[in-house]
Image: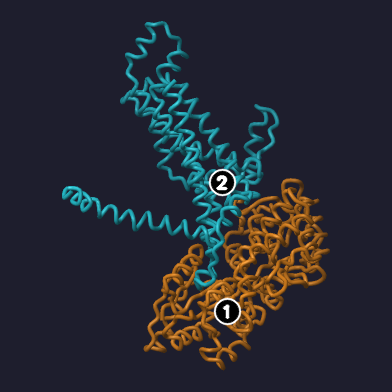
Chain colours: A orange, B cyan
Amino acid sequence: VRFWAVGREGEYAVDLLQDFLRERPDIEVDVQKLPWTAAHEKLLTAYAGDTLPDLCSLGNTWIPEFHALNALAPLDCVREPVARYHARRLLPGILDSNRVAGQLYGVPWYVDTRLLYYRRDILQKAGFNAPPTTWAEWEQMLGAIKAMVGHDRYSVLLPLNEFEPLLVLSLQQPSDLLRDNGRYGNFRSADFHRTLEFYASMFRRDWAPKMTNTQISNVWDEFGRGMFSFYISGPWNIAEFKKRMPPELRDAWMTAPMPGPDGPGASSAGGASLVIFAGSQSKPATWAVMEYLSRSPVQQRFYELSGNMPPRRSTWQSSTLASSPYAKAFLTQLDRVRSPPKVPEWERIAQEMRLTAERVVQGVATVDAACTALDRKTDEILEKRRWMMDQDRHT
Amino acid sequence: MRTQRAAWWFVAPALIVLGVFFFLPVLAALVMSLTDFDLYALDNFDNLRWIGFENYCAAAARAPVLEGARQHLVLRRARRADVDRRVARRGVARELEGREVSRLVPDCVLRAGGDHARRRCRRVALHLSYALRISELRAGAVGRLDPIDWMGNPHWAMPAIVILAVWKNFGYNMIILLAALQNIPDDLYEAARIDGASGWQQFRHVTLPGIGSVLLLVSILTMTGYFQLFAEPYVMTEGGPLQATYSVLYFMFEEGFKWWSLGRASAVAFLLFILMFLVTVVQLRLGRERSDA
């Protein structure tokens, strides 16, 4: 079985698989590591050259794209009952991100969602004892903190070169980001309008600096210095903040689920899944590796090694995870996750969304004009998809 | 006849290599630029549509391309200014004989320091809150200066890249120009002085014609180099803020390797080729006129 493991997780996969190799001496696993930055290109090149591996860990937003390429084997055809049995024990929102057109294509390996990191001490100083649960509460806190810290510090960091914060906020609204089964954009909707207005207002009121991540040389240092008190980020930052925050601030920060428009809000369903490529010659053996990697004890070891959060509920009850106060908010949030639209073009649309938001923030466009322009741009990007669908071709 | 055939045999290996690895891919890219080759087409060639020059129109209509071209003009002006300045300082340069090569050393050290490391430093140096402190230090001497948010302000990000790019290429062009300046025989200047030529006249009638061809070479190299500006925005700003530092090559890279619309990306490549070809023709013509005059 050839296994392409993307990212740092590849190194841990080699360790994890030692026991498996003892258990199933008949199966040989060849783990090859890929960096995240090159993974997408390498996979597409391998697809073009017909050299895809049997097993791969794929960012779950890429699943629709590789599905459009007919590159993924549906799991139900491998061993239906096992896949179903497995499915029941997984966090439903994350599992759903692995489904395209009703078919399951991947098993979540580790999960990722975005939520709030905040400075407990600064929030307390501003007179708040608990993190926000609604946008209105959050606005109050942002305003109070800004009034307290003065003009060269801010309440929240929303890097202008990341689309995730805006995506999370817009997934909290009831309406979808694309309409007609992903044929057209839905950015003219009142819901998206409201989200963009809220996002832009945080910059207008000087609660968030108009900055990109490349301008801030060290996010962790600046968080420690109190340049901002809220930051929307993923689980990998728990370990980073633990490591990099100065000792006197060790208890000064915490994580909290995302506040929503009116009550606790949703966040994006991210993470990586294990998939079997359609061209694999040894699907049963590949499935055996996959099944082993998603066992609860193995996942717990994986968490201990890498800090990646497991997709199975039972693993969350393990001692190390249950005792981590920072992880608790993630478990809460993982019950309220939503997948971004599942079209192969999504990544590009998300970038256009980010650019649109940046234009509004920099004062080049109004919210109205920006929503219309984004919608038009999205329709343009989806033109080929519409053509494919009209011709009844596989998308 | 036989010798001619023998000649073909001799050049055949080179021709085949050139044909297979250069002309064929170029031809394929040209064909590809007339289609909407993308992910779907990668899956199945039936999903490929012939769309004629649509890619070209779309690419030309995209604001970033025009914006990118405008930036190249800004860059070119900056380059010219700095070439001229150096030429004007030829008095200093002409003194530079072999024994004074030491002057070049600092530049070489800077280059050896590695582009990436320097950009990292710059990123820290341009960090808004630290730039603020530096300006506070100077406040007493120069009066109150507002800090410039180099990388965050759409109006200043490109100048920041221009400064870096000019600095980066300064040494390379300087070496070529210095070699040309040293090639002008001293007796020409001596003769000019005897004829009573002023400093400016010497510069106008001896130095400029002397380095004219090299100046043309440098300007063409610089032009082609900056049309392909990529590494600087890629590392420093990722094309932002507000796509202010989005170069043509960056556009091509994103279309091709990020979004896999290879048809569109090939069209951009050919447009860039045509643009650079035209500018080079103009440059060559201007250069010829000058040497005729």
Q: Which element type, helix, strand or loop, lies under badge 1?
A: strand
Q: Is residue B1 above or below residue B91?
A: below
Tag 1, which chain? A
Residue position for label 1: A108
Is residue B89 in view?
Answer: yes
Query: Given the image, on which type of amino acid does mark 1 rest?
Result: Pro
B104 left or right, relative to A373: left
Residue B118 pos. (x, y %):
49, 44
Give the numbered dot on residue B240.
none
B86 left or right, relative to A94: left
Q: Residue drawn 29% across and 56% down?
A: B16
Q: Residue drawn 41% across and 20% down?
A: B207
Residue A316 pos. (x, y %):
62, 81
Farthest residue to the front: give it: B1
Q: Is residue A217 above or below residue B96?
A: below
Closer to the camera in the image, B286 or A349: B286
| C-alpha distance separating marks 1 and 2 | 37 Å
Closer to the camera in the image, B105 or A145: B105
Q: Nearer the viewer, mark 1 or mark 2?
A: 1
